[in-house]
Amino acid sequence: MTTNKDVLIKVDDVHKVFANKLHALNGVSETISKGEVVVIVGPSGSGKSTFLRSLNLLEMPTSGHIYFEGIDITSKETDIDRHRQKMGMVFQHFNLFPHMTILENITLAPMKLLKKSKEEAEEQAMELLKQVGLEAKAESYPSQLSGGQKQRIAIVRSLAMNPEVMLFDEPTSALDPEMVGEVLELMKKLAHDGMTMVVVTHEMGFAKEVATRVLFMDAGEIKEQGKPEEFFGNPKDERLKEFLSKVL
Amino acid sequence: MAAFAELFYQDFIVDNRYKYLVRGLGNTLVVTFFAVIIGIIIGFLVAIIRSSYSKMDKPGVPVKILNFICQVYLTIIRGTPTVVQLLISFFIIYTSPNVSKTMVAVLTFGINSGAYVAEIIRSGIMSIDGGQMEAGRSLGLNYVQTMWYIIVPQAFKNVLPALANEFIVLLKETSICGYIGMNDLTKGGDIIRSATYDPYLPLLTVAVIYLIMVCGLSALVGRLERRLRSSDH
């Protein structure tokens, strides 16, 4: 079923029921191909974050399967840590490691997991930092950075593992309005460089401009999806129409 | 002044009585040092088991058993006086003549301290934001690596004052070593007291030595804390 080699992630009838009986995902099936920029929108509590977090099993689905590069990562036999190395994740609250310098934040995983030497990892980290214009912050600690800078570092930290896909969980929701732009700029650049991205966001402008596909989630289901022009220009689902009328 | 000199002479110089204090101090330091190491190792392991257990959705049977053992350990150690534990160790558990009194004291205080250290470290681990574990795991680090490189260093920093306090308490608590006839610092002072019938100088000297050690330790910890805090600006 995953013979198409352009398919990167395949989600097959995934359900997620939390301990408090909340039915967050209600049978979601979806395919994400290489090079796609999939933006997920929807009201809060619609399950979009749960869906994103289940892609790298930060949320373990209650039932259903998720295939990454053709391998069922929901299977008990799969070593999820190995696959997570290729799935970068960026969080709403950055989650930088406060006890480490920026450079240490970025080089930790490449050194421990890809067995890079310190020099090699630092060289790569500096290269990435230059690309985002933050090389001067290499020896700083996260607490010395602005929110926008923190989030760009968090993106760089994920990129240092050379991931196949980047997952963004509301990456700009915790930022001051004036810092949203710099993070979106970097994400746009990533998209233009061909990175496969799955983005949960409320930034409709970003969705319109950068997404190759937009998904609308509500009540734990994908209610509608399409290319941005059609999705925003000609929505069919009633709930989506209502949602768009409020956010646009 | 002459009376004081005479007392000093009687208490510390005659028969080289000062050696009771020197040897006693040595024993106190040895017992405290090794007990701290044992306490950290036990406390760390118990804390990891307990905090992992409470974070798991469905803990497996081995984890449940380990957690239960830890629970029993904490209850017994924290629920009984240290003196009683020391006496039980000496008269019931380690009765072999091959086990020295120092060894009995090290094991007893180490196991005792481990219980308190465990709860301190556990509270530190639980205080770290869940996003830190998620960030580590999402990079592909496994649970142990994430704990070791990301969670524990932060937890340790947060609980350092409480941990230092525990070790200061431990240093002072070793003064009950005399119960099993061990010549620690306190016992040394007491031996001089009973030999010279002067309670003042020997006991006050002992008290001052403890005080100096505690103040020294506190100052050291203060410096370490400042260094660790260099990442919060």
Image (cartoon, coloured by chain):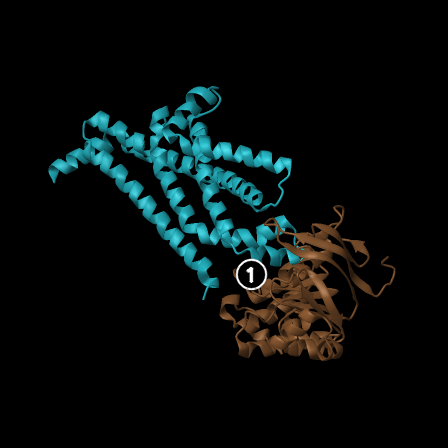
Among the chains, which one is brown?
Answer: A
Image location (x, y in percent) of residue A60: 68, 52
Relative vertical location of residue A75 with respect to residue A246 in this rendering, above or below: above
Q: Please state if A245 lies on the left or on the right of B212 as rendered.
A: right
Relative vertical location of residue A170 with respect to residue A178 in this rendering, above or below: above
Subunit ID for the residue under disc 1: A
The quadrant of the picture occupied by the N terminus of chain B is: top left
**Which residue of the protein is positioned furthest toward the right in this rendering?**
A3
Image location (x, y in percent) of residue B190: 26, 29
Is any part of residue A133 visible from this angle?
Answer: no
Image location (x, y in percent) of residue A58: 65, 55
The foreground one among A162 and A31 is A31
The foreground one among B158 and A205 is A205
> For numbered disc 1, what is the local secondary structure?
loop
Is any part of residue B74 visible from this angle?
Answer: yes
Residue drawn at x 42%, y 23% as measured from the top left: B88
Image location (x, y in percent) of residue A57: 69, 55
The quadrant of the picture occupied by the C terminus of chain B is: bottom left
Q: Colour of chain B?
A: cyan
Q: How many marks?
A: 1
Residue type at numbered disc 1: Phe
In the rendered image, which quarter is residue A206 located in?
Answer: bottom right
Read off the residue under disc 1: A97
Relative vertical location of residue B88 with respect to residue A124 in this rendering, above or below: above
The foreground one among A230 and B3 is A230
Residue drawn at x 62%, y 41% as measured from the top left: B59
The foreground one among A76 and A156 is A76
**Which residue of the protein is positioned furthest toward the front in this rendering?**
A238
Crowd band around label 1 with a 10 angstrom C-alpha radius: few (<14), some (14–19), many (20+): many
Residue drawn at x 60%, y 45% as measured from the top left: B56
